[in-house]
Image (spheres, coloured by chain):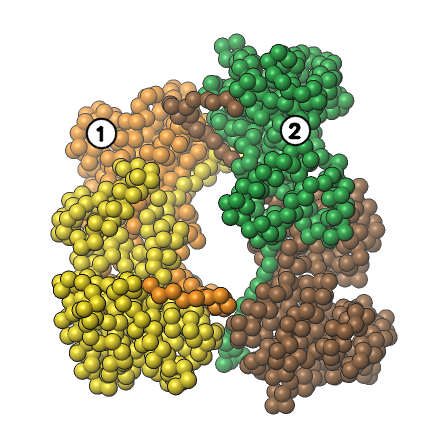
Chain colours: A orange, B yellow, C green, D brown
């Protein structure tokens, strides 16, 4: 849009952006079109406040987001936090494709995407023995390994932290491990211990437990930025319970609704408010960085990226210019009011 | 847009909105589509904070606006404050029309519009004796009177307060009264003393005084919500000084650029950032409530009203729904990543 | 769009337009904004050719349309002829609604709409005894009568002509009368004999007969501008035969595809080219005068009415105006080429 | 737009398109996406008529265009013929730039563009001695030569034909040669005699002669597809005569209106109807192949190229699909009509 931005990236991954910028400049980007700063958050915060920042597009933790909204007096656009869900509807179809898509959504990039699938609602028809979506997903996820880079280090959660969260989830009444659940065999990789190295993992939690206890709900809906998801089965006639669970979640980033049943799809879309929602028998939860609108519907601070619409809404501002060249009509009479 | 809003109006003029709503309901508006509350600001503030307001469109003082931005964590759209200007360019034309328009912009509704003209920049060609725009404007404004309701009470500024501000402006070096400058003859009206009743008034201030002293600038650019404007003459070649004065103003609501010279118009448009700008030989500063975009370009909190574009940007929120019904191609092969 | 048009209406119904225009003028339409002419087609043809008509929006017979295309050298927009179909898909739902909609589509306005339903393709699931869509449709159509004006005169087909066409259709191998098939009881109405007065009628024709014989196909797909439709049943797996029949029809005005099955709907939409197509479990074939785009996809002469898009495409013309006010850059160097 | 087209190019320049297509295929264009045919016009005509061509985008002579409109029954989009004009308005500015632009518009590509400038209307202020736009243009055009390829062969007009047309124009009362007017010195080039090789030429014609005689008008407005233009001076107050001359021309492809005076520009735009019009102090007449809309406003057969809008309007066709999934409301009651 022509703005000169200052980019501040998390220190752990800053070097990726730096190399990317060097490549852009090599390809012809005028070096003065963007500034890159390497610093911790509080330093950037002070720069923005003292520098009277006109606009900030922030992605990161909710805690910092809240602080920035106040510090910048609302001159900000935010990404919602990412506890993203997918619903498998009552009409299983394109089974192989959906096994592949579910595995990608939850475990690609070792689950470290804000739009990664954190909770999978499975209609009983997908759980039937002849389909056994969870079994197939276990098989597909089981093919992942460090050698071919379908698995990698978890940057912000250690194995101990992952295991502790897994234990907490398993303590919910009726919860049980679906697959994974332990560190990757250390003989197969050289991931340093300061990073997590965990198998693609899924834990089943009964929907009843989510509905009955706020405490269990809070544990189950804590985002683990790694290869970890919750699986919740539901029966025919229980879709409104599923939607009630979803409505209770505080954040609404991305979502998927997998079905060919247009009435089912419309019912789910009409009762949810995620910023980016995929619908249809091939629905995904994550396609970043395409078509990404952050935050729930109705929040004026919601940000978006990558589409022309999103870039226009976030990085430009409406300005109304009305030209009136006349001429004044020969029959014009000015009436004073 | 389908939202159910709660409207809170300034206590002094609330009854107008109440009567308007009663008329809407009489005409068929479902009574539950809008709530109207009669209260002072702090009460409304508490309602919004405790009620977790999703969005607030605020028009009012900058002081309250700043507080609301923090209290509502940025879930707000704002109107910029209204110290609005018009530039008469180097090529006088449509003289009668512009006399009429300038009078309307400054004094219609007794000057009590957020978009009323507060400062008029007059190119020396418009000041030449054969045109004498200020003299003609004085004559036109002099026709206003209470009886035919082209003048009325000033709700928020008493005569004493107006006179005091006028004195302050006149104390700027080189300032002089252009016309008006005193209360309306009391024998011609029954406006209560608690309201202002003042003649349409204009004070000339030299541009040099605005450029040389921040204190003089601050006095001259204080918004008086009544029939009062500042007139600043400039000479050929001084347009960039005019734009420097404008750029120093903290607020950027509406503006007018009166000229047939497209190069002049484009130069002024390119160097100013008002939310709503009228350009061309018939440019105005106020046309509320049509085509009104509030606030300067580039502020993500800027609000707008009345146009389809403004209503969409303020009262709705982008939501991205991506349908993918497939079908899956016969040659599809899932590659794990 | 600001054009001053000359309207020529079929002589039989001209008085309706005349009265309508008188009403418009009464309501404020400037009388010089439209001209109305009362004449036969050849007279209008000569006016347009000699008057160098800029554009003609024509609805009427294919024969005249072809002549006009040549006479006016293509300065024309056309409505396609109306032999319109509806497909009831494999998943019956909203039965009562669809019975009502099918009756409306075929017999409302006594079947005299260009978009009236002329052929109904019925999936065997809709023909099953517990649904019996044709039986229910017979019952619903049977409620029509002249007294409450749900039936009326047929302006362009006499009873003899209707009966003759019905005989021709019944002579197709396997064809049989579904319901109706005879004139309205003369004791119940006073419709003059020069007009048709016929019961809502449907004739079943086997799909095989349509596919096997061009002659049978031509008879069955002749448009009867009155309360008459063909019913064609098809079995699971035969949808591509249905689409082959449709593709063979020369005209492609409106159509309906009734199903909740998005894959079925998409398959039918992808393989048909009607100008206006309704899709979904509540699909209709006729909703004139809303959302009406005439003619098949891909014909540059296709016309449309009523939507902003249609009016823009038919009654305006793109004009490209490129403003270039410069200014010329200080580093500009003209290179001659 | 996804259509598979058959391209037929004039035989003289076909090899350019063939080489271009070979390059496209080399770059990855699927070879089956376009067909190229090498033939004369009558052969192509027969292919289109017998092949039931759905759409034809034709650029070429008006004679063939008229025939095709009839043969193809209007399934065609046309380019208007190119006798293109430019008006230099009453306010000379950016003189050097406009000299350069006028030379480019008339003589670049040796004048062989459908959008080349054929008639230049010069306001007396541009003709004043201190500006002498025609003298400067003569000087600029005089720099053209075969060696640096700023001049080249004229493919469709021989030197004899050009000279004959020049004589005809010079026979108009008051006409005189402005510059050029003879073949390029043969010692400076090797252009074969079957092609034209002519100096950039301009002939002045008085406006009065164009207004007084249809015969003179017809001669002066004959398109010469080469480096040849007519210059017409006009005085202050005569712009409406200029517009009358322009309105009399049968074709309306491109045009330029050179002025900073917005009232003058708007008056000219409001009274002309060219398909592509450039306006402003830097207006050109030719910028092919950018922003090119063919034909006058209001002709439904007008074609365009290169912009997204033009490609959509010419190569696609509106199709209206209305989805209605319901569901049917619980309070629905079917009323028969």
Q: Which residue is mark 2?
A: C83
Question: Which residue appears at 50% of the width and 68% of the height?
Answer: A330
Q: Is residue D192 above or below residue C29?
A: below
Position in image of residue C106 (x %, y %):
59, 23
Mark identifier at residue A182:
none
Q: C250 left or right of B255?
A: right
Res. D234 in view: yes
Q: C125 left or right of C184?
A: left
Q: Quadrant of residue B105?
A: bottom left
For the residue carrying disc 1, how many other residues have a C-alpha within 10 Å: few (<14), some (14-19), or many (20+)?
many
> Are circles 1 and 2 on residues that touch, CB within 8 Å?
no
Q: Quadrant of residue D224?
A: bottom right
From the viewer's side, name the closer residue of D126 and D185: D126
Position in image of residue B171 (x %, y %):
18, 82
From the viewer's side, name the closer residue of D313 and B132: B132
Position in image of residue B265 (x %, y %):
44, 73
């Amino acid at each position: 849009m022509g703005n000169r931005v200052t980019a501040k990236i998390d220190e752990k991954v800053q070097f990726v952006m730096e190399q990317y910028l060097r490549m852009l400049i090599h390809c012809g980007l005028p070096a003065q079109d963007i500034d890159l700063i390497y610093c911790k958050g509080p330093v950037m915060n002070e720069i923005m406040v003292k520098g009277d920042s006109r606009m900030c597009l922030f992605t990161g933790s909710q805690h910092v987001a809240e602080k920035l909204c106040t510090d910048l007096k609302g001159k900000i656009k935010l990404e919602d936090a990412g506890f993203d869900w997918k619903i498998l509807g009552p009409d299983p179809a394109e089974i192989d494709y959906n096994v592949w898509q579910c595995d990608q959504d939850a475990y690609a990039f070792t689950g470290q995407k804000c739009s990664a699938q954190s909770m999978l609602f499975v209609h009983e028809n997908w759980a039937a023995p002849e389909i056994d979506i969870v079994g197939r997903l276990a098989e597909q996820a089981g093919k992942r390994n460090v050698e071919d880079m379908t698995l990698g280090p978890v940057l912000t959660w250690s194995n101990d932290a992952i295991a502790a969260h897994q234990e907490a989830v398993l303590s919910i009444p009726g919860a049980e491990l679906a697959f994974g659940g332990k560190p990757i065999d250390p003989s197969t990789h050289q991931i340093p211990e300061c990073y997590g190295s965990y198998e693609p993992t899924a834990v089943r939690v009964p929907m009843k437990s989510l509905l009955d206890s706020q405490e269990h709900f809070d544990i189950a809906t804590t985002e683990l930025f790694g290869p970890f998801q919750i699986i919740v089965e539901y029966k025919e006639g229980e879709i409104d319970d599923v939607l009630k669970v979803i409505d209770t979640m505080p954040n609404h980033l991305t979502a998927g609704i997998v079905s060919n049943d247009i009435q089912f799809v419309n019912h789910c879309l009409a009762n949810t408010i995620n910023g980016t929602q995929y619908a249809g028998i091939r629905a995904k939860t994550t396609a970043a960085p395409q078509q990404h609108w952050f935050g729930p519907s109705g929040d004026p601070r919601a940000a978006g990226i990558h589409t022309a619409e999103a870039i226009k809404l976030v990085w430009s501002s409406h300005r109304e210019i009305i030209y009136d060249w006349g001429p004044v009509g020969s029959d014009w009479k000015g009436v004073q009011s």
